[in-house]
Every structure is written in structure tokens, then in C-alpha cells.
Amino acid sequence: MIVRLLLAALAAGLIAGMAMTPAQYVKTIPLIMQAEAYEGSGAGHSHGAGETAAAAAATPGHSHDAGDAHGAHGHDDESMLGFGRLGDTVLANLVAGAGFSLMLAAVALLTGIHFPVGREGLTRGVLLGAAAWFCVQLAPAMSLPPAVPGFPYADLGNRQIWWVVAVLMSGIGVWCIALRPEWPLKVLGLVVIVAPHLWGSPVPEDLSSEVPAYIASAYAAASLATTLFFWLLLGGLIGHFLSRVPEEAPA
Amino acid sequence: MTAHTQTLSLTDRIGARTLAGLMALAIGSILVFGVGLANSQALHDAAHDTRHSYGFPCH
């Protein structure tokens, strides 16, 4: 049963992760590439020499050349894994899908969410996926918006710590609100969700950026939209697949 | 004096669902950390577009 549960979660994650690549190439990655054309003047970050032709044309002699100094592997067709930019992204999306799926299935298994066979299991899965989208995407995005390359950045480590804490606290808060009947716990859940935002996320000192505001705002919406698609699909698949693992089945 | 030593496996004690959940949590955390947060240039480059698209803090 354990192996079948893990395989069910893995399968759901791989399918949802595979579906994510075309969604990203429709919505988010064109904006990332556009933004990279503006990146480099002052951001102090480089992506190797293999940027888009537009990047080279837009800012001749910009700091991307410095990529040869630290990590010459850009997002060109000669990526270090040898799959090219598209291949790397497909692979990363599969791994991300599997990872998120295993963690979401773990939450369902550890909090005692059961998936009955049929429509009810599917519905519960989709709701679980929606809750996960709130915790992993929307809640952290409210203080740390999804950002394109070339944006002003606060310290990476601080932002990562804040992001992980915000995701964990949002998860605990949603659990208190959605799965606990006691109303004091529901109030506490709300407080736990809001707390990291009151504390405040790391904000860069200088907010000016070369990247046009239109790209940035379109990107934030695109990121939230594509990930909503991912989490709803993933949740539905988890609900469906886990409902088909019999409780008493041998490993 | 026959001692019936019945060794309970981990599965019997905490339940198969809980055990599977803990295993899934461990494996999933490692995968998500690797794709989204690991501070390795190679991993960052390979997962760059994925990290940005999922809103992971990047750069």
C-alpha cells in the first residue's frame, strides 16, 4: 500500500509537471525572455553569454558577458545538462511536479484527508490543490511577488527563508481554518497566515528597474495563473489516483 | 515459559498511511528544494525558468 500511494502521487506529479511546460511557454517564459533583454544594467546577475538575440541587440556590451566568469552555462542551446533551455525546463518541471505532488499527497495522508472513489474524491483533490495554490503561490506572492529576471532583488537567502516560512505558516493557517472545527483555532489560523506579511518580506533598497512595468505586472498575473492551472490539475489527479489505492492493499 | 515476542513493524505501529505520508514528505521536500531553492549554479541554471514561473525567490 505504501509503494502504491507513493507511485500514485508520483504519477500525478509527473503528469501535472509535464502539462506545466506548455503552459509556461504560452504565458510566463516569453515574458522572462523579454525581461532578460533588459536585464544586466546594474542587477549584477548574469546568465551566461547565450541570451536571446534580442538581449544582445537591446543592451550591447552588457554584463551578460561576465557570465563566463561565474558559471558559463546560460540558457542557450548548450546548457550544461545538454538538453537545451527547453529540455532543462521540461526536466525541472517534471522534478518540481513530482516534488510538489509528493508533498501534497503527504499533507493529505498525514492530515487524514481521504479520497472516496468517484466524483467526491476528485472534488476533494481539486479543493486540496486550490488550498495548496493559496499557500505556495498566492500567499507568498502578496509580499514577495513573482519576479522576472532583471528586477531589483533583496538578499537571496533572506527572501528564500521568508518564502519558506510564509508557505509553511500559510499551510498551518489553512489547516486551522479548513480542517479544525474549533473557532478559536480558525481565528488563530487567520493570524498565522497574516503574520509573515505583517513581519514583512525582504525588500530591495533601490526599487528602480530597467524592466518595463508592463512586463512585470503581466508576469505576476501569468505566474499566478499558470500555477493555479498546475495546482488544480495536480490536486484533481492526486484525488483521483489516491482514491484508487485500496486501503488494505499489500505493499 | 514461552515468551511470545511479537515484534510490531513500523507500519503496524503508526499505520501505512502515516508512514507513506512521511516518506512522501521527505522525498518531495528534497525534490522541491533541489528545483526551487538549492544554491547551486548548475541547478539554478537548469531550473531557471521553472523557478521564476513558480515564483520561487531567484537570483
Image (tube, rainbow, N blue to C red):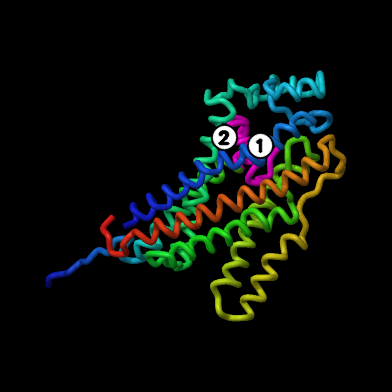
Q: Nearer the viewer, residue A215 or B3?
A: A215
Q: What amino acid is labelled 2 in the image?
A: Thr
- Which chain does the numbered disc 2 sit on? A
Quarter in which the N terminus of chain A is drawn: bottom left
- Which chain does the numbered disc 1 sit on? A
Specify whether A213 is left or right of A89.
right
- Residue B57 drawn in magenta: yes
Crowding near the residue tagged with mark 1, few <14, some 14–19, many ≥20 C-alpha atoms within 10 Å: many
Crowding near the residue tagged with mark 2, few <14, some 14–19, many ≥20 C-alpha atoms within 10 Å: many
**Which region shows up in magenta?**
B37-59
| Residue A201, label in figure | none
- Residue drawn 71% across the image and 49% down it: A221
A55, above or below B9, in the image: above
- Residue drawn 78% across the image and 57% down it: A200
Q: Nearer the viewer, residue B21 or B10?
A: B21
- Tell if the residue under mark 2 belongs to the same chain as the one under mark 1: yes
In the rendered image, which residue does mark 1 sit on? A29
Callout 1 secondary element: helix
In the rendered image, which residue does mark 2 sit on? A89
Q: Position of residue A130 (x, y in %)?
A: 58, 60
Quarter in which the C terminus of chain A is drawn: bottom left
- Residue drawn 77% across the image and 46% down it: A217
- Residue A34 drawn in magenta: no
